Image: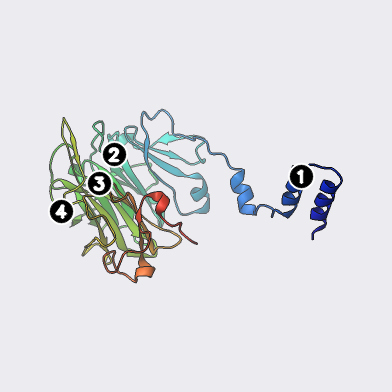
Amino acid sequence: MPSKLIAAVAAFAVGSSAYSAYSAAVAAQQQPASPVETVLNGLAFRNIGPFRTAAWVTAIAVPETPARDHLYTVYAATRSGGLWKTTNAGTTWKPISDSVGAAAVGAVAIAPSNPSVVWMGTGDQANARSSYSGKGVFKSTDAGATWEFMGLPHSHHIARILIHPTKPDVVYVAAIGHLFSKNEERGVFRTTDGGKTWSKILYKNTTTGCSDIAMDPSDAKTLYAGMYTHLRRPWRFDSGGGETALYKTTDGGDTWKKLTNGLPTEPMDRPGMAVSLSNPNIVYLITETKTQGTFFLGFNTILNWNDLDAGQAAPGARGTASQIPQERE
C-alpha cells in the first residue's frame, strides 16, 4: 500500500473524520492531469469579433500555410456586413469586400496550396426572410486585397466553396439558388480553369439547390453533396422533402450516386455534412425529420462501402446526437 494511503488510514484511526480520511486516500491515488488536459482546462473562450458588422458570422477560413498565417490570419464572412480579415489573431479586423458591392457573404475558402488565392461566395445562406441575395462568386489572388467577379450571378445564395488541395484552379460551389422564386442556376458547380468556365455537375430542378458540400481529405475526388428542396413564400416557407437527399461522387463530380441506406425514409430537411479529418471513413450528416432522427454517421470501413447504400446500416448510425457513438482516434 502506498505510504500516503497508509498515512490517510492512520489519520482516520487516531480520530480524523471518515470523510477527511477517505478524501485524502482518494487524492493520493488520483493520477495527475495530462499535459493536454492541463492546457485545455486552462483555456477560456472569448469573443474576438469582428464587431459592428450588423450581422452574424456565416463562415470562416484559415490559411493552411505558411505557419504564421495559419496561427494569426482568419477570414470571417457575415450575412450583411461583408467579408472581414484579421492578421493578428483577432486583435483588429479589416473589411476587405467593400469593392464588391455585396453586403451578404455566405461562403469563403482559401486554396490549401496557395494562401493568396481566396474565393468568396455572396448571398446569405440562412434562407431567412431577411436573407439578402448576392451577386455570384468572386476570387482574389492577393489574399483579399482585390477581387475579380467569376460568375454565377443568378445563384443568389452560396452555401459553400471547396478548393482542390493541390490544384487551386479546381473549385466546387454549392449554390442554393433563389429564395423566393424558381431558377435554374442552382446545385453543384465546378470549374477546372480558375472560374473562367463553369459546369453544373449536380442539378435536380428549379426549386432544389445545394445546401452543403464536403470533400474527403484523403481523396479529393470523393465529395458529398446535400441537395435541398425549398421555396420561401410571403406567407410560409416550404423547406425540405421533394428532392432533398445526400449524394456522393468518387470521380470529382462527373457522376453522382444518391445515398439511402441507413438514412431516413421519410422526407428530410436541409442537409449539412462533414468528413472526419482524423478518420475520413467517418461521415457526419445533420438534417431534420419528423420521427427518424437528426444526426447520422456513415462508416466506410465497417461497411466496406463505396457509398452509403452499399451495405447494411451500422449499429447506432441513426438517431439524435446523444445516441451516436463517439469518434475514436
Q: Of 243 and 180, which appears nearest the observer?
A: 243
Q: Alpha carbon of mark 2 to alpha carbon of mark 3: how far?
A: 13 Å
Occupied quadrant, residue 75:
top left
In the rendered view, tell whether residue 13 sits above or below residue 77: below
Q: Secondary structure at mark 3?
A: loop
Q: Alpha carbon of mark 2 to alpha carbon of mark 1: how far?
A: 58 Å
Q: Alpha carbon of mark 3 to alpha carbon of mark 4: how far?
A: 16 Å
Q: Nearer the viewer, mark 3 or mark 4?
A: 3
Q: Are marks 3 and 4 in contact (CB under 8 Å)?
A: no
In the rendered view, tell whether residue 319 sits above or below residue 98: below
| Identity of the residue furthest to the right in this view | 14
Looking at the image, is mark 2 or mark 3 earlier in the sequence? 2
Image coordinates for residue 177, horizontal then vertical, percent? 19, 44
Q: Of 21 and 302, which appears nearest the observer?
A: 21
- Residue corresponding to mark 1: 18
Q: Alpha carbon of mark 4 to alpha carbon of mark 2: how far?
A: 20 Å
| Horizontal arrangement in the rendering, residue 295 relative to residue 290 (left or right) | right
- Residue corresponding to mark 4: 204
